[in-house]
Image: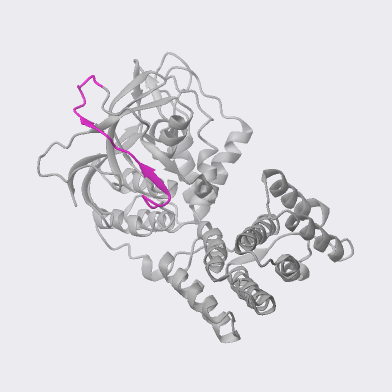
Amino acid sequence: MSSAIFERYYREIFTDLTVTDEESDEIKDMIRETNPPPDKLLWLRSTSFRIGTEFITTDDDDDDDKARNISLLKAINAIVHAIETTTMAHTAEGSEDDFDEAEVEDFYREIYSDLAVDREESQELLDFFKEKNVPPKDKSIWTRAAAFRIAVEFLSDEKAENVQLFRCINSIVDAFERSCMTPKPYNLKKEKMNVDVSLPEALQTIWDLDVNRLTPGEDYTIDVQGGKKPFWKDDAARDPLFTFVNTKEFRRKTYHTFIALLDNYTSEVGVSEKVTHKERGENQRFLDAIMQTAPMQFCHAYCVEHGDDVPKSKQGFMKLLDDIWFDLYYRDRSAGRDSSGFEHVFVGEIKNDQVSGFHNWIRFYLEEKRGDVDYRGYIKPKSYSDAPTDDNDHVLTLQFNWNGVPKKVGTSFVGVSPEFEMALYTMCFLVGEKENIFDIDTGTDLFKLNCKVYHMGKDKIGTSYVEALEHED
């Protein structure tokens, strides 16, 4: 899905501050054509507000000024309506008899009164729609549209105040959608499902399908600092690797369900792991979320086509994913089952006073933010012909200490979504070899990578990670 296409189209819509029936149908057609996954719906809606603030007007003629801003609000509402009716379904089970329109309107006025929605008010909004005044299905459109209608009462002749008002409306709509609606099931379009390709080509395909990947310089920034050889003892990086991450992006479903898994494990190999009922539920929610994405749906189709006994059904494939990634096994025979593929690859383990696994950038950022990771520099390329390591690279070979324990060399993707890495490692495990060499064109760089896969027993992932072989600008 091209973000720029929607940004341009929103600006076209706002130019004349009207949305005709024909334009509304065009928006719906664009959404159907681009087929955004559930994690992109928040972006689609929030961007309509963000672009809309560019068109807020203030001049000396208050009446004309307010009329234009009212039209702008109506245009944003029309876009949000098109998004909701095309991609979402109402799930709240409110009763017509219990629903109080006046209470909803008064609550909106209370929210707008100070032109700010803090964390406490965000929770109040969720509770309001979930428990206090749950909209019935036939009041879904009214509930969302009322947020815009009541906002008109709070329009100001100060642009900064109107920008804050628009953000408040977006917060209300966000809470309403999270409480009362759910994305319709996502299905990757058939034309994107060309599985009659080699594994290296298929791995480039899942990169191209990763619309939830973050953008360097916009969603996050890194400071690679100095390079070193793995055996050099000196610290080549005085500062953290990550200088900025827009953690609002972690609200995307595949991200926040992934992050929920990271505290479910004990890092030391040889210490038995215990999986609680709550943690099993978190595993399931993560698998549910990633299976609503293009990379994992392509992964499933490709593995069915090229693998042995890979279940064709979604539920069967999710059971297979659960088995190969989350089933516990013995990594150290001195204790009980102490490890899993997911723990090793994404969370990291400590064995023989060395960090083992730990190949995920989100985990790295969160641990670095807590002060538990000390980034010590990137590993210098093996060849002088390689492109220099810089801050927009999506693949980084680095050295770090985790809670004082060293990781002498490890390679991680940076900025990619959890579903991309799950798809890549799963495909190499199910239909690849122990070593799988492929090229990834990231749009700014070309990397030749080797995805290494080691089995634990016959049917579990022991580890999987990439090694950077070549790097070109």
Q: Which residues are magenta?
A: 215-234
Q: Residue furthest left?
A: 384
Query: Camera-side residue: 221 or 365?
Result: 221
Query: Camera-side residue: 221 or 380?
Result: 221
Q: Locate residue 38, reporting x and y percent.
A: 53, 59
**448 up-or-down from 407: above or below:** below
Q: Residue furthest front?
A: 60
Q: Locate residue 422, reporting x and y percent.
A: 40, 45
> Would you identify the image quadrant in which residue 173 lies?
bottom right
Q: Locate residue 408, reporting x and y percent.
A: 27, 25
Query: Camera-side residue: 8 or 333?
Result: 8
> Would you identify the image quadrant in which residue 348 lies?
top left
> Would you identify the image quadrant in which residue 227 lies?
top left
Q: Is residue 453 visible?
A: yes
User: As drawn, is 135 to the left or to the right of 366?
Assistant: right
What residue is drawn where x is 45% and y is 56%? 312
**468 up-or-down from 140: above or below:** above
Say whether residue 328 is magenta.
no
**425 up-or-down from 463: above or below:** below
Q: Quadrant of the N terminus?
A: bottom left
User: As drawn, is 470 to the left or to the right of 111?
Assistant: left
Q: Locate residue 463, reporting x and y percent.
A: 34, 33
Q: Is residue 1 visible?
A: no
What residue is drawn where x is 68% and y is 66%? 156
Q: In terms of secondary structure, what is the magenta stretch mainly?
A: loop
User: As drawn, is 21 to the left or to the right of 236?
Assistant: right
What residue is drawn where x is 60% and y is 40%? 281
Query: Camera-side residue: 341 or 289?
Result: 289
Q: Residue furthest top?
A: 334
**4 up-or-down from 289: above or below:** below
